[in-house]
């Protein structure tokens, strides 16, 4: 192929060492977050089987928070949880600097003392052992996620493209690092904004045959990048008036929530490509200038 079809091939893109480092830590961080989500789902499923009151009691704290998990480890069965005093609950909330501790402690105590159908004691003890293991694992994951987050920030902020990525609406240090890591930094990798959009999976696929004409979303894509861009598009609704107008215009055309958000993400990828190509930071007025008219397409 190299000898005969050289003119149809292009060199393999090569990212800089700094971009590769960002990719390693950003992917490690995201994998830990996904692992925490999976562990939490197992924990929630187990609690539903024998201790649903705990799900209600700790709903205001978020069951993945360390203080809620510490309380769960302290009292993993309905009987032990019902004996928790308000002082014990408040002490845990105080250690984790929760606001409105007294009110939260009272709400948690009331919820934990609600009556529910009881399982045999050996079964309850077995469930409690499983819940304790899951809770301790989530606490460990919380610690490692926080540590890896600092690594992501340290590596990504050293990259020369960091300022451009962080200037984009809806992007923070972590999301920006993920987008940078998955797109890479080889300037020759994407020949056009469309090529970058195609790789991101935000651009639609148009299929036409005879009188049939359909537009479909791309489902074969980089899932890590798609997740980061979806998060950016959602946050951009609050951070950018232009993004909000563009999104509202799609919804006004009876486009559903997810497709409208994907179209906004597609537009933001195109803006990012232009900023990287010209080495300029995002400018709200320039980015949405041709969408400023209320009837613009």
Image (cartoon, rainbow, N blue to C red):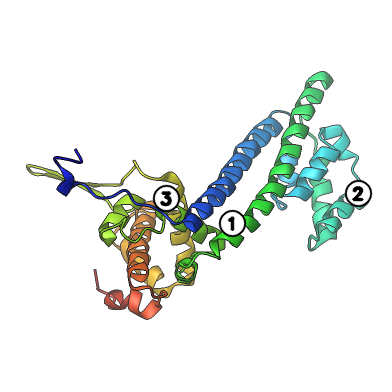
Q: Above or below — where is 165 with respect to 124?
A: below
- Which structural element holds mark 2? helix
| Numbered badge on residue 88 | 2
| Numbered badge on residue 152 | 1
- Which structural element holds mark 1? helix
Q: Above or below — where is 156 with respect to 12?
A: below
Q: Bin the neighbour count of mark 1 within 10 Å (Cα to Cα): few under 14, some 14-19, many 20 and up.
A: many
Which residue is depicted at the point 36% across and 61% down?
269
Viewer-nearest residue: 145 or 24: 24
Q: Bin the neighbour count of mark 3 within 10 Å (Cα to Cα): few under 14, some 14-19, many 20 and up.
A: many
Mark nearest the camera among 2 and 1 is: 1
Q: Quadrant of residue 44?
A: top right
- Nearest to N terminus: mark 2 or mark 1: 2
Viewer-nearest residue: 282 or 215: 282
Residue 137 percent across, percent down from the top left:
72, 38
2 and 3 marks in contact (CB < 8 Å): no
Q: Please say whether residue 201 is visible from this viewpoint.
A: no
Which residue is depicted at the point 32% across and 66% down?
249
- Nearest to N terminus: mark 2 or mark 3: 2
Q: Which residue is mark 3?
A: 226
The answer for how far apart the CA atoms under marks 2 and 1 are is: 36 Å
Q: Bin the neighbour count of mark 2 within 10 Å (Cα to Cα): few under 14, some 14-19, many 20 and up.
A: some
């Amino acid at each position: 192929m190299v000898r005969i079809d050289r003119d149809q091939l292009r060199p393999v893109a090569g990212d800089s060492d700094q971009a590769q480092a960002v990719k390693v830590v950003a992917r490690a961080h995201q994998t830990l977050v996904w692992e925490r989500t999976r562990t939490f789902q197992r924990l929630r499923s187990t609690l539903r089987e024998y201790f649903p009151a705990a799900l209600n009691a700790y709903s205001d704290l978020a069951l993945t928070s360390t203080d809620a998990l510490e309380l769960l480890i302290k009292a993993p069965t309905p009987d032990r949880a019902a004996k928790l005093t308000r002082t014990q609950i408040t002490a845990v909330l105080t250690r984790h600097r929760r606001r409105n501790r007294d009110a939260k402690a009272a709400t948690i105590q009331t919820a934990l003392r609600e009556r529910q159908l009881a399982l045999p004691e050996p079964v309850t003890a077995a469930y409690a052992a499983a819940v304790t293991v899951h809770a301790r694992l989530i606490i460990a994951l919380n610690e490692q996620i926080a540590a890896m987050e600092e690594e992501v920030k340290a590596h990504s902020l050293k990259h020369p493209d960091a300022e451009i990525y962080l200037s984009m609406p809806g992007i923070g240090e972590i999301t920006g690092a993920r987008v940078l890591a998955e797109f890479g930094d080889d300037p020759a990798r994407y020949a056009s904004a469309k090529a970058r959009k195609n790789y991101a999976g935000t651009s639609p696929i148009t299929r036409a045959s005879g009188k049939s004409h359909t537009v479909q979303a791309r489902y074969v894509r980089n899932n890590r990048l798609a997740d980061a861009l979806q998060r950016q598009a959602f946050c951009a609704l609050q951070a950018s008036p232009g993004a909000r107008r563009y999104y509202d215009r799609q919804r006004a055309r009876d486009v559903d929530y997810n497709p409208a958000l994907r179209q906004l993400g597609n537009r933001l990828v195109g803006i990012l490509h232009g900023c990287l190509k010209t080495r300029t930071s995002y400018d709200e007025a320039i980015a949405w200038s041709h969408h400023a008219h209320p009837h613009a397409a």
